[in-house]
Every structure is written in C-alpha cells, then in structure tokens.
Image: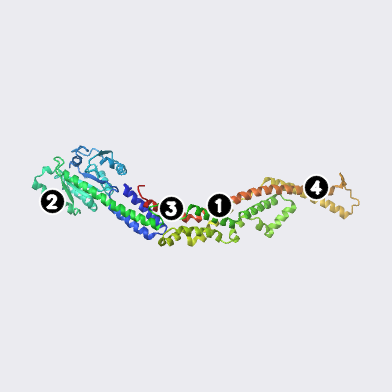
C-alpha cells in the first residue's frame, strides 16, 4: 500500500524513525512512538487536509446526476446504460489539486475537473465507475480505494435499494461502517408517506448488514431537493477532518520530538553530530597512529627488504652466499629477519592496545555524553563501548591478514643469470684452488706452471691468476646482485608498507567507528521525522 498525503508521509518518516530508535537501544521510546503511528494509521483515510469522498452505485441510480447537482453544473455525463469509462472522474477545488496529485495519479484518474465552489473548497469528489455485480473489477476498485480515502457515498434509488447482491457487498464493507454514507436519490418519485417507509426500510436493512448507525441523505438530483443539505454535511465533514488531522499531526510531532530528544537531537535546532567533526577527526587519527605503531610499518619494510635480499642470494649468490643462506634458513635466523607475514601477525607483541583503544573509547564516550542521561547508557552500548577492545583487535587482525595474504616477494631473471655466472666463477675458483693445492703438495718439482706477465707484479702463475679473477668476478657479481636486490627491495617495501598503512588506517576509521556511524545514521532518520515544516 502506497503512502499518499502529507500526514501519510510524515507518519512514514515516524515509522522509519521508530526502527532507527530501536536499532540504537531506545526501545521504550520507540514503543511509545510506534503506538502513536498505529493509532494514526487506524484512523486511515486520505492523509491530507482535503476530505476525499467517492460516489459509488449501480447503473441507473443517478450517481452522476447527484455529482452534477452538487456542483451546480454537468461534471459527469449521466447515462442510463452501462458505464462509459473504467476510470474515476475527480472534481476538486483548484487550490487543492497539488495536494491530491499523488492520490489521483495512483487512482489513474483520466479526467480531473477543477472548480471554485467555496462551500466545497475542502472536498474532493470521485465519481467511480458504476459498481454492478457484473463488473467485479469496479467492486475491486472500491475495495482498494476505501482504505485510502475518507468516505464512500453509496447512491441508491427506490427501485434498487433492496437488491440482495448490493446488501451482500455492504456486509463485506461493514468494518468500514463509520466511513460509509448513503444517498437515496429520486425521492421526487415517492409520495411523502412512501418516502418515510422506504427510508426506514433502508435503515433497517443497513443495520442488519452490520452498519449500526447509517447516515442516509434523501435527495432528488432532478429537483434539487436535499442537495443543499448534502452539500452542507460534506462541508461540515471536511471541517471536522481538518480538526482531527491537526490533532493527529500534533500527536505525531510530539512522538517524533520525544524520539529526537532521547537521541540527543534538538527538534528546533536540527541535527548536530554527537561528536564535532574536528574532534572526531583528531581522535580517529590518534587511533590510526596507535594502530600503525603496533603494526610497525618501518620494521615491516626492513623485513620485506631482507626477504628480497634472501631470495636474491638464494637464486643469484655465490657458493659461499648460498651456503650462508641455507645455514640461516636451517637455524631460523632467516625467519626472524626476513618473514614479513610473521612480522605482521605478531603485531600484538609490539605494544599495548591502549594506544588504539583509548582514542576510540574517548570518541565513543564523548559522543554518548551528548545524549540525555536517561539514554546515555543505552547509546553507549549501541556505540559498542563494552566490546571496543575486542572489536579493534579484530579490525587490525583483518587488515594485517589481508596485507600478509597479498604480500608477494618478487623474483628476477637477472638474479638467475647472475647465479649462473656465480656458478661458473665458483667452478673456476675451485679449479684454481685445487691446482694451487697440488703445486703446494708437490713442492713445485717437475710440474710446469705457465705464467702471465702482469704490470708491476711481473710474472704471475696462471692458477693464482685464475683464483684472483674468480674471486674478483664473484665479488663484482655479488655487488651487482646486492645493488639490484636492494633497489627492488626498497620499492617492494615501500609499496607493501604503504598498502598496510592504508589498509590499517581505512579499517580503523571504517570499522572501529562503524557503530558510531550507525548511530549517526539512525539519528538522521529520527531528525527527519522531527523536522519542522514540509519535507
């Protein structure tokens, strides 16, 4: 069912505010406001200041003639045959047309006729298609329409008022008896005595149908008899509705104001955040800084650089370098110095949670202190203060786990190429060392050894030259490897550290203060219900 009319819209906002209040622990206040919304809803009818009445009736009873007589001009063509349209016709005062726009659109009104009739300035009359048992769709229209308008006036005549099928339908509508009117048209066709008899018989039948106090108007659309009285009664009903609508709106506004007050909102000044923006930003940054101190981004960067260097040495180091890397892995030294994932996971060992928790707890307590004392404890609970430490630990755990999952230590083809050259240099070094060893053992006797003339040094034995060259080449390759691995390590460390910093900062700001955001969102809904003036 759609909401139509200013009061309906205001009640819809109140219902939204009720659910918002419940979400932040204001159960008692929400229950009271819910009762007000239900009471207004039970009043039903069109939620505006216009009295909306539909004319219904079977074919030939003079329903359109009654509307024409009320208007003082032909509004709806009077036909003695089946209805000429399946859509209602609206007759409404020009100043009220805007207020009724949503209702008329929902009804799919094909014709809207405006007027300047002062007596019925607050009345909208809908001329419905003829309601006959053969037109079930028209009866369904009345069933759907009834909860959304103020009254349905049934037009009957002396010949059809006792139709058993019509009375069976009225019995179905008995729950809406207080919003049903009845017009006995064509009274000019009855003698005075017969008229009283017919009216009394109609009243008796309506009471039997479950309508205990039926309102019956006796008119003649042809002669105008009873039309002025009917017009006056409709104007009185419109005036009464304005009074009732004002009272209902006052009740709604009072309920909305009570919710707003409980949530720390001044209905007059409007919504203000529980925590000033500048103060919130300050505390958020303190919490982020505390979390980053525990995560230790610089230390993570060192771990990443060391891990890159370890991988580079494993793939491109000299024989000695690879041996040292293997020894470091076996002794666990590598895991202590070059395991970024484990370093992230061990964030709890680097300090107390207070450096993160204290700013968050201060923010939540300060926010709750902006609400009235009766609400403060419940708002604190809604803000998550009792579970703040566990919540924060989960926030940092999620951020560090996500960063560790995404952490990839790179490889480089250059390292493999340097590694191959290191193996060649190592082989040459071993060969030269073995050659020199043999010469030492043999004492140099009988074993020819070639020499190479070197500047300053003079003739240098080939084995010694090969040994020196292998050591020099290995050292140069090691320097190139370290230089390249250090460059990559710094880049990767900066990227990883930056990603971790951003992830932790976003997680703390989003998740650690998520309940404060939820409370503020609820207060926005409550403030909308309590706002002064049209929305």
CA distance separating discs 3 and 4: 78 Å
CA distance separating discs 2 and 4: 129 Å
Q: Is residue 420 left or right of residue 117?
A: right
Residue 174 vs residue 395, the one in the foreground? 395
Ranked by sequence position, the earlier of labels 3 and 4 is 3
Task: Report the mark closest to the observer, 2 or 1.
Answer: 1
Task: Report the mark closest to the observer, 1 or 4.
Answer: 1
Q: Which type of secondary structure does the marked residue at label 1 adopt?
A: helix
Q: Which type of secondary structure does the marked residue at label 3 adopt?
A: loop
Residue 62 vs residue 103, the one in the foreground? 103
Q: Position of residue 486 (x, y in %)?
A: 68, 49
Residue 245: tell me if it is visible: yes
Ranked by sequence position, the earlier of labels 2 and 3 is 2
| Residues marked 2 and 4 touching at CB (< 8 Å) | no
Q: Residues within 10 Å of mark 2 (few under 14, many from 20)?
A: few
Q: How many marks?
A: 4
Q: Which type of secondary structure does the marked residue at label 2 adopt?
A: helix
User: Label 4, on which residue?
Assistant: 469
Q: Residue pushed farthest right? A: 445
Q: Which type of secondary structure does the marked residue at label 4 adopt?
A: helix
User: Label 3, on which residue?
Assistant: 272
Q: Residues within 10 Å of mark 1 (few under 14, many from 20)?
A: some
Q: Residue pushed farthest front? A: 269
Task: Report the mark closest to the observer, 2 or 4.
Answer: 2
User: Label 1, on which residue?
Assistant: 503
CA distance separating discs 2 and 3: 63 Å
CA distance separating discs 2 and 1: 82 Å
CA distance separating discs 3 and 1: 30 Å
User: Label 2, on which residue?
Assistant: 200
């Amino acid at each position: 069912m759609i909401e139509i009319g200013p009061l309906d819209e205001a009640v819809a906002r109140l219902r939204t505010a009720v659910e918002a209040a419940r979400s932040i622990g204001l159960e008692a206040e929400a229950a009271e406001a819910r009762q007000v919304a239900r009471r207004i809803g039970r009043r039903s009818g069109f939620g505006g200041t216009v009295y909306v009445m539909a004319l219904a009736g079977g074919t030939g009873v003079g329903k359109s003639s009654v509307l024409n007589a009320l208007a003082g001009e032909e509004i709806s063509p009077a036909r003695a045959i089946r209805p000429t349209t399946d859509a209602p016709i609206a007759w409404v005062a020009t100043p009220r047309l805007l207020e009724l726009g949503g209702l008329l659109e929902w009804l799919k009104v094909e014709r809207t006729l405006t007027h300047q009739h002062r007596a019925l300035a607050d009345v909208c009359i809908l001329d419905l298609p003829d309601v006959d048992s053969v037109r079930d769709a028209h009866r369904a229209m009345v069933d759907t329409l009834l909860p959304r308008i103020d009254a349905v006036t049934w037009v009957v005549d002396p010949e059809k008022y006792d139709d058993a099928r019509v009375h069976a339908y009225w019995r179905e509508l008995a729950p809406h008896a207080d919003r049903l009117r009845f017009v006995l048209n064509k009274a000019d066709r009855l003698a005075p005595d017969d008229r009283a008899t017919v009216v009394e018989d109609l009243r008796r039948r309506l009471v039997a149908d479950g309508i205990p106090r039926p309102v019956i108007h006796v008119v003649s659309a042809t002669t105008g008899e009873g039309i002025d009285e009917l017009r006056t009664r409709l104007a009185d009903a419109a005036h009464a509705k304005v009074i009732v609508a004002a009272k209902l709106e006052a009740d709604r506004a009072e309920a909305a104001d009570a919710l707003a007050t409980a949530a720390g909102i001044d209905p007059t000044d409007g919504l203000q955040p529980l925590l000033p923006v500048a103060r919130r930003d300050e505390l958020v940054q303190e919490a982020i800084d505390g979390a980053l101190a525990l995560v230790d981004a610089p230390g993570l960067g060192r771990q990443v650089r060391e891990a890159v260097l370890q991988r580079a040495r494993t793939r491109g180091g000299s024989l000695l370098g690879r041996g040292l890397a293997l020894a470091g892995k076996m002794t666990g030294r590598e895991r202590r110095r070059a395991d970024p994932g484990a370093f992230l996971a061990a964030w709890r060992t680097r300090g107390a949670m207070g450096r993160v928790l204290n700013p968050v707890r201060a923010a939540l307590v300060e926010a709750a202190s902006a609400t009235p004392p009766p609400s403060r404890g419940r708002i604190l609970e809604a803000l998550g203060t009792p579970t703040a430490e566990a919540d924060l630990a989960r926030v940092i755990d999620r951020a560090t786990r996500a960063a560790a999952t995404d952490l990839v230590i790179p490889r480089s083809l250059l390292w493999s190429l340097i590694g191959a050259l290191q193996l060649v240099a190592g082989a040459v070094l071993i060969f030269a060392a073995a050659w020199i060893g043999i010469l030492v053992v043999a004492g140099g006797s009988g074993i020819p050894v070639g020499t190479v003339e070197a500047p300053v040094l003079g003739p240098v034995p080939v084995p010694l030259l090969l040994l020196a060259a292998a050591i020099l080449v290995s050292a140069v390759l090691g320097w190139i490897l370290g230089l390249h691995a250090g460059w990559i390590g710094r880049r990767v460390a900066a990227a990883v550290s930056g990603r971790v910093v951003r992830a932790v900062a976003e997680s703390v700001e989003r998740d650690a203060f998520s309940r404060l955001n939820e409370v503020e969102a609820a207060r926005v809904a409550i403030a909308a219900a309590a706002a002064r003036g049209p929305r």
